[in-house]
Each structure stands twice: as C-alpha cells, then as structure tokens.
Image: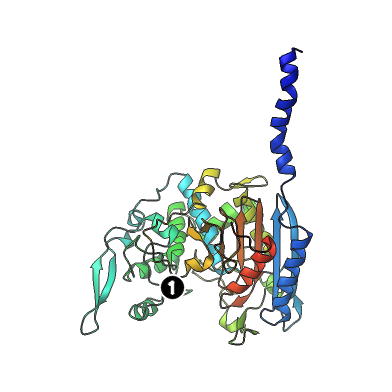
Amino acid sequence: MKPAIALLLPLLIAEFAQPAIAQSQQKTVVDATAKSRIDAALKSFVDSGQIAGVSALVYEKGKEVYFNAFGYADAATKRPMDRNTITRIYSMTKPITGVALMQLYEKGLFQLDDPLSKYAPEFANMQVYKGTDASGNIILEPAKRPITIRDITRHTAGFAPGIDHPVLNPLVAKADVFNPNNTLTEMAKRLASLPLLFHPGDQWGYGASVDVQAYLVEKLSGKPFDQYLAANIFKPLGMNNTGYVLAPADRNRFAALYQRDATGKASAISMGDNEFNIKDRALKPGGFGLISTVDDYMKFARMLLNKGKFNNATILKPQTVQLMATSHLSDTVSQRMWLPSKGQVGFGIDFAVRTRPPASAAENNGVVGEFFWDGAASTLFWVDPVNELTAVLFVQVMPFYGGLHKAFRDAVYGPYKQQ
C-alpha cells in the first residue's frame, strides 16, 4: 500500500462510518421513562372517570415500543379495552379517503388544480353567501373561481355543512346531505345545491370536502367507494377489522360510545343514538363512518411512514406521500377555524402538517414534519418521520377531548423544550 493511501485510509473509514455510528447512537423517544409517563397519563384519565377506556400503540424504527390499554370498552358489561376492541374512528376516515383519491391521481385520472366540475358537473357555477337584505333574504354572488380538487383535499372549497352559521344552518338542515339513506351521488347533488360559505381558496373551513373526495373515487374508479377501499387499501395492508359495517359476530368487540358532561365525567350514549355501523347504510362517507382496531390503523400509519409501502404492499409512491404530507395552505388563508388549536400546523392532503415547533408548553407537543389527524370520539394518530415513529390512540368519548391528546403527546415526547 502506498504511504499516502495508508495515511488516508483511517480517515476514510471514519468518515464513512459516521452515519452508521450517529444512527446507532440516536436517542430513543419511547424509552422506559416514556413508557411510565404514558401509562400514568392514560390511567389517570380512566381513574378520574373522564373516559371509560383507552388504548395506545406506538411503533419506533419498525418495532412496537409501546402498547397498553386501561379501563373498559364497555363499562356496563365490564368488558376491558384491548387491542381487539373495534372503535368508531370518525374523521380518521379522512386520511384513508385521501390515500384512495391519490391512488387515482397516480394513475393520471386528474390533476389537483382541475376544476371539480370537470368530473362532477353538479359543482359548476357555485354561488357564495354574501349576506342578507333588509327583509332577511339571502344574497348570493357567483364564486370568483371554480372549486378545484386541491380545494376539497385541503378544506378550502367553502362548503357550509359542518360549519355553524346562523343564516345557512336552516338550508343545510333541509338539504339533509348526510342522511344515511343517501348514496354518495345523492349526497353530492344535495351538497352542490347549497350556497358556499366563502369563495373557494379564501378560508380553511372543515366540513364536507372529503365526502366529495369519496364521490370522486367512486366516479373515477367505477367502483362503490367501500369496495374500492377494501380492494385497494384494507386487503393489501391486512386491515381485516376495518370497514363501515360491523359484522354481527363482532358485536361483542364493539366499544360503547361515551359523552362527557359539564363536570367532565363520561356516561354511555345509548346504542339507539349511534347505530350507523350496525346496519349496512347506503351512505359510505369519505369524511367519517369507518370502524377499526388500533392494530389495523397502525398498519395504515406505518405504510405512510414507509413512504407508501407496508410489508409486500405498495399503496402509494413516495413522492405522493410527500405531497400529501406537505402543507398546501398559503399565508393568504388567514381564517382557519379551529385549526390553530392543533399547534403550529398547516394542512396538506387530508392531514394536518406541523410546520413549526411548539411555541410554548401549552401547545400540543410534536416534531416539525409530522402529519396527523384525529376523530370526533377523540381518537388520534400521527406519523413522525424524523424519529421514525407512529402513534395511534383509541378512545370513545365525545365531545372531542383535546386535553387527552396533549397529555398523550407530552407523555410520548417528554417535557417541553423550547427550540
């Protein structure tokens, strides 16, 4: 060996070894201390009667690093919460719908900035609420531009359902957009008959946009939406407990739904008020309605962390996952309803996306680059690419309980550190 090469060789070996050494020494997020914090946090909510039961599952760097469950799936029958419990995931349906839509995007069936009316003519020539005249009659004006598919993926379409508005509420109630007997086609027809609350692109308004995504999936694929999900997402990922209709044999695995009162105590909601998943309804919405298990949803989350792949299934291309996990909200969209309550976030394609670290200990904990969403019964999931971490929290309590989410996030990541 020549002397010069002999002198350089140790330096070259050290340089190429550094990434591997750095990776091996990277601090684990969910260590023994974090596990104790998570246990204590979740158990405290059950012990105080704020929730009946809860389960949490965390994977880090491809391995399960935490699972535990506390309390009851059904307190009346003393049936414990466990990883086989089937729960309503409500708006955690939305990211699944977004993935379905973006599979069709990958096939070239549409572009994000295409007018929605190109594929769904019902939504052409939309009218926008402007106010009322002296007699109380509604004043409308033509939309400044068409609703685009990008608008329905980031909640900037302007749809009124889901947004409390004193003037439009009666019209929304009369349209009965989400009657469970409506097909997606009928849902879209009724939704398109309503005025928009704001001009497309002007504001962030959470509502019916993802249900229109489901309608598009049905139209573009030529398959009923639920069948499309089963064939293209659930079966490939092995999500065998996820769907819209609860099998009769699984009734004893279905969690009861709870309501927190003014004192913070949870009491059961009668099944008569919540039978959507017990019967096979015509409506298979994109924005809510799925039921799942914590392990099933974790497979979906891990697929996203793995850039569209899970085990032997390829669901999306890496660049598509990245597109979904990038905020599409410009700074001009200043009115964002309650989205700022989620932390320093923007919004991508059916996910909130963390764009800045928490500004204070009062904000939700998390890492820049994570993307996540939650559900009305207080379920939650997030994908943290920086730490290669995915987390799923299942609980069945309404109204939405942000305090539980903050406690869980704080337990996972530890005390707030200003960045």
| Quarter occupied by residue 198 | bottom left
Residue shown at the point (45%, 75%) measured from the top left: 179
- The answer to whether any part of residue 82 appears in the image is no
Q: Which colour scheme is used?
A: rainbow
Quadrant assignment, res 261: bottom right
For this rendering, which residue is in front, 207 or 355?
355
Badge 1 crowding class, 10 Å Cα cut-off, few under 14, some 14 to 19, many 20 or more, is few
Query: Residue 413 location, x and y as percent?
Result: 67, 60
Residue 369's x, y, as percent? 56, 53
Q: Is 134 or 138 nearer to us in this picture?
A: 134
Judge whether 247 appears above or below 311 on screen.
below
Q: Position of residue 223 (x, y in %)?
A: 49, 56
Q: Residue furthest toward the left?
A: 134
Residue that lies at the very extreme toward the top in this rendered image: 2
The quarter in which the N terminus is drawn is: top right
Left or right: residue 384 compared with residue 326: right
**The C terminus - image quarter:** bottom right
In the image, residue 398 sits, relative to residue 416, either above or below, namely below
- Which element type, helix, strand or loop, lies under badge 1? loop
Quarter of image, res 93: bottom right
- Report if residue 7 is visible in the image: yes
The residue at 65%/51% (across/down) is 387
Q: Where is residue 194 in the image (x, y as percent from the top left)?
A: 33, 71
Q: Is residue 345 left or right of residue 198?
A: right
Front one among 275 and 111: 111
Name, please, the residue furthest toward the right.
Answer: 32
Q: At label 1, which amino acid type do we have? A: Gly
Between residues 180 and 259, which one lies in front from this camera angle? 259
Left or right: 150 as drawn, with respect to 287:
left
- Position of residue 78 in the picture relative to residue 274 (left or right): right
**Residue matched to label 1:** 162
